[in-house]
């Protein structure tokens, strides 16, 4: 599944800066070779759409793609429950790349917090 999401990633891009109800997060660092720009668009406490841009390795890009599909139509509470372990199992991420799943989990939580601070 990792290769499928890496070679054909879903929801790559970003929302227009003027879009309302969008939570944004940037995690990682260029020094470590991984950076993720992650966005969620929320309506009535439900994630309606997600976008990402990522610079990094195969598991990072694949996990971002997977998460943008997995979290669509989930509530913010349900999204906050997603753990890195879930991603590791679903995508069969190798042990040396677990940090990629941790970054995605962090990005989700930060985007939700950003949305909540802006609009709630």
Image (cartoon, rainbow, N blue to C red):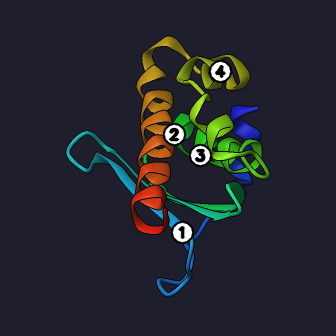
Q: Residue sitting at 58 percent across and 70 percent down? A: 13
Q: What SS does tag 4 mark?
A: helix
Instruction: Give the mark nearer the N terminus: 4 vs 1.
Output: 1
Within 10 Å of disc 3 (Cα), the crowding (few <14, some 14-19, many 20+) is many
Mark 2–mark 4 CB contact (< 8 Å)? no
Instruction: Give the mark nearer the N terminus: 3 vs 1.
Output: 1
The residues tagged by marks 3 and 2 sit, at their Cα atoms, a distance apart of: 6 Å
Of the pair 33 and 38, the residue shown nearer to us: 38
Q: What SS does tag 2 mark?
A: helix
Within 10 Å of disc 2 (Cα), the crowding (few <14, some 14-19, many 20+) is many
Residue 60 marker: 2
Q: Please tell me whether mark 4 or mark 1 is closer to you in this view.
A: 1
Q: Whole-percent x and y of residue 52?
A: 55, 59
The residues tagged by marks 4 and 1 sit, at their Cα atoms, a distance apart of: 24 Å
Q: Residue sitting at 47 percent across and 20 percent down? A: 98
Q: Whole-percent x and y of residue 99?
A: 41, 25
Q: Which residue is mark 1?
A: 22
Q: Whole-percent x and y of residue 38?
A: 49, 56
The quadrant holding residue 26 is bottom left
Q: Please tell me whether mark 3 or mark 1 is closer to you in this view.
A: 1
Instruction: Give the mark nearer the N terminus: 1 vs 2.
Output: 1
The residues tagged by marks 3 and 1 sit, at their Cα atoms, a distance apart of: 17 Å
Q: Residue sitting at 46 percent across and 53 percent down? A: 111
The residues tagged by marks 2 and 4 sit, at their Cα atoms, a distance apart of: 14 Å
Q: In the rendered view, would you say 109 is above or below 43?
A: above
Q: In the rendered view, would you say 20 is above or below 84?
A: below
Q: Please tell me whether mark 1 or mark 2 is closer to you in this view.
A: 1
The residues tagged by marks 1 and 2 sit, at their Cα atoms, a distance apart of: 22 Å
Horizontal arrangement in the rendering, residue 32 relative to residue 51 (left or right): left
Instruction: Give the mark nearer the N terminus: 4 vs 3.
Output: 3
Q: What SS does tag 1 mark?
A: strand
Q: Which residue is mark 4?
A: 86
């Amino acid at each position: 599944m990792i290769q499928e999401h890496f070679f054909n990633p879903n929801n790559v891009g970003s929302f227009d800066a003027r879009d309302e109800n969008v939570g944004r997060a940037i995690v990682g660092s260029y020094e470590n070779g991984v950076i993720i720009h992650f966005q969620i668009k929320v309506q009535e406490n439900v994630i309606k759409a997600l976008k990402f841009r990522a610079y990094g390795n195969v598991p990072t890009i694949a996990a971002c793609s997977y998460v943008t599909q997995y979290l669509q139509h989930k509530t913010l509470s349900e999204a906050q429950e997603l753990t890195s372990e879930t991603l590791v199992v679903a995508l069969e991420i190798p042990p040396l790349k677990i940090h990629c799943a941790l970054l995605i989990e962090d990005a989700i939580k930060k985007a939700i917090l950003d949305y909540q601070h802006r609009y709630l």
